[in-house]
Image: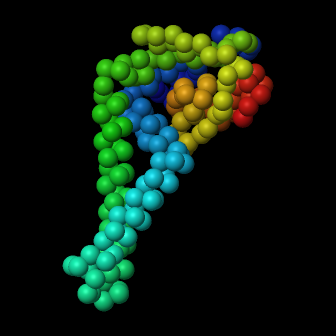
Amino acid sequence: MNPNEAPSVINPTSPVIQFNFGLYDLVKCRLWAQYHHKILIVFMLMCSFFVPVMDWNAPQIKNHPLTERVFVFIFTGVTVFCLITFINVLFAFILAATAKNKGLVGTHEIELGPECVTEKTADSAASYRWSAYHKTRRSKNYLFLFVNENNVLYVPKNIFPSTQTMEQFLEVIRSRSGNC
């Protein structure tokens, strides 16, 4: 969406934003979420440590000087971390390209009503009560509205004409949900 296109507002009590969300946006948001997931990060770090540890006493390495063994340990750890990262990126692309995500890509309309958050797309509509609203997170380019513990609405920041407009939108969320 063009950054100059301002989100539409029906009335001050129920702000409405409308935006296009593409496949590239979906992949970026999924990757951000994966790398902010504590369990996944711990798993990646454990694998990056334990795989080289298993090779520490391998016959091919055991008789080499300590400096070479340390180099192989670090190189293997970094390689495992990069491999897991590549698999996550590949997995995010595959998930984004499946028909299951048809409703995630395209035009979205999000309304912050007095009772609930409503999201409408060409393929679906869903409402989430404010009492279930979980949290709001930000990345450099997106807002993540966790409408409950298992569902997230991705909102590109560039749809807002100014930071102040975005903050007003977020203030409505804070006031209605009691969360930040």
| Residue 37, image x, y percentages | 52, 45
| Residue 94 location, quadrant | top left
| Residue 115, image x, y percentages | 72, 12
Q: Residue at x 43, y 42 (%)?
A: 31
Q: Residue at x 38, y 22 (%)?
A: 101
Residue 157 visible in the picture: no
Residue 50 visible in the picture: yes
Residue sitting nearer the eye, 138 or 44: 44
| Residue 80 location, quadrant | bottom left
| Residue 28, image x, y percentages | 43, 39
Residue sitting nearer the eye, 118 or 169: 118
Count every numbered label the image shows and give the total.
0
Quarter containing the C terminus:
top right
Q: Residue at x 35, y 64 (%)?
A: 51
> What colouring does the structure picture have?
rainbow
Residue sitting nearer the eye, 109 or 46: 46
| Residue 119, image x, y percentages | 55, 15
Does residue 124 sit above or below 146 in this rendering?
Answer: above
Residue sitting nearer the eye, 59 or 15: 59
Does residue 97 sit above or below 46 in this rendering?
Answer: above
Does residue 82 sit above or below 168 in this rendering?
Answer: below
Does residue 88 sit above or below 77 in this rendering?
Answer: above
Quick one: which residue is furthest to the left in this view?
60
Q: Is residue 126 left or right of residue 175?
A: left
Q: Is residue 157 left or right of residue 51?
A: right
Q: Residue at x 54, y 12 (%)?
A: 126
Q: Is residue 122 left or right of residue 126?
A: left
